[in-house]
Image: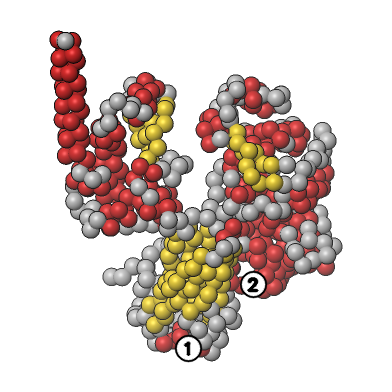
Amino acid sequence: MYLCYFDEKAYEDLENNIVKNKDHYFDNDDWVSEHFKGKNYFHRSRIEVNSVELQHLPANASESMKNENDLINVRLLYNAFKDLTPFQACSKELWSYLAHVQFKDYVHSRWMRNPGKRTIATRYFVNGSQGIFHNAISRLWWFGHITYQHDEKNPYKLTKVLLTNQQVCMDLIDEPYSFNREIVKGMLTGLKRFMDDYEIYRGITDIWRDCVQYINRKGAIVNLDALGADTLSDTVYDTLKKYHNKRQK
Amino acid sequence: MATRRKKFDYPHPVLWKNNDDYDCGHFTIKKTSAEEAEDELRFRFSYDLTSEGLEQLVRENKAKVFLRIECRHTAYRKSFAFDYDEKEIQVVIKAQDVYKSITIKGYVNALENITRFHLPEHNKMYFDNSMSISVDGGGVLAYDDGITVYLDSKEIQKPLSSIISFQRADLDQDTIMPKFDDYSEKIVVFLREDIYEKYYDMQNEPNIPHIKRHLVGITVFPVLVEALSMMKNHEKEASSEEDEDDYKGKLWYRVIKKKIEDKNLSFEDPPVLLANELLGNVILSSMHSIKESFQDAFSGEQTDQMSGGD
């Protein structure tokens, strides 16, 4: 199938009218084509990808079900859209179209059952420099892109670590250095080693947050980009161990 | 008395043009060549480091020179290391990974923990030998804010008409409203619905041959004067990274600036004169074309009258 994307003006129109259109997002009806009333609001690109159906999230899903659902959908989407280039994958019009039209039922099931104040703005649109990590569809592609390990038997090994829980994921992807795949690899490898060695898979959030804050402080005097994944992995492992031991006392 | 800048205050001395941690020395990076192959971009970058102490650390492989290349348009971010005995590096980037521009920052990083980091060139006001200064492995020893390399060199050769876009807008009072900091790379000139219709009709009017020149004088000229006034102020201000991202990096800004440089003009010149020059003396040519249009109309009237006389 060929990917479609919103016309620039159509995107702007929708973004400027979130409040006015709020009910449509909640009702999940087929409202976008009606909204533009026969105007040419999208374009068909020359980017061909495999067709994909994303797995919907059941109502009242627990946090761990959300994490599992995210992991499944990252694999589905990234496998299907793997040939997309990073430049193409930065198009807000593309991701917004997919969220509004093609995958609207998935987006509704994942994000609109218990929405926050900015859910529509962040999950249906792309806002700010890290916005591609928040849009309901682009986040799946970018999580795959920054964690996919070509040379591993299970190339999504680190994706699973990233999606240990939503907070672990957010703490990492909200940092500007998360665009550097070496840094992401180092940090997630260190986290995985720690979780495996100490058999801590739940309740990791607090020490992970402390660890990320430590890495941020370190990043103020050290060029993290140049450290290499192995060094960073050791640093993360040692830091998690230190904070874990501190909490045990 | 010297004061250190708050931003990038490191607990150890860092050689950087915007601080005075070092009494002497400098560290800069520059692009020495750029080549575009079919699906990749090949660059050569070099560095210049003048600090005997830091140079020695690099020679001894205790420190290394790195580049950090980022493209904010494609979320590309990667680090490249110079060999310890090389002052130049080749960097190959897949063309699909970057777009429009890349920023390159330079670093000299410690490769191992350095205890008692004291060099003769350190500023003794801040870092005297009695202090115990240590640097962790990976610590930044020198920094260059770097350069921005634009990847759309063909784009900035384009004519001025390519960077101004007229669009209809739902304006109440204002008839015309230029936007310079829009999401677009162009200057977007919003015209009130009725003005836009007239503008469009006149653009496509085959019976008035000089009409396009009039239109440039009426619409493009004032917008360009406003743009140049803004640019003039902007050029005076010390640019920051944010400016580079939001304003100076815009295609319209770079196209106009390139044309000013090509014509040996200067931002010191009044914006009205600059705009007139950039538009090929639009004031005079508009006057001529108005006159010619009048003459055409007048002679046409005479012919009609004469015909009528027959």
- Residue occupied by mark 2: A228
Picture layout, residue B221 above or below residue B269: above
Picture layout, residue A102 above or below residue B76: above
Q: How far from the left and from the top, in percent, is residue A80?
A: 75, 49
Q: Which quarter of the picture shows residue A96?
A: top right
Q: Which quarter of the picture shows residue A158?
A: bottom right
- The amino acid sitting under disc 2 is Gly
- Is residue B84 in sight in this rendering? yes
In the rendered view, does B180 fall on the left or right side of A185? Answer: left
Who is closer to the viewer here, A131 or B226? B226
- The amino acid sitting under disc 1 is Gln
| Alpha carbon separation for disc pair 2 and 1 | 23 Å
Q: How far from the left and from the top, in percent, is residue B283?
A: 18, 38
Which quadrant is home to the C terminus of chain A? bottom right
Q: Work out which residue is located at the far front of the displayed protein and give it.
A: B310
Which quadrant is home to the N terminus of chain A? top right
Q: How is the image coloured?
A: secondary structure
Q: Residue B56 has which mark?
A: 1
Q: Which residue occupies 59% across, 59% down?
A: B97
Who is closer to the viewer here, A224 or B36? B36
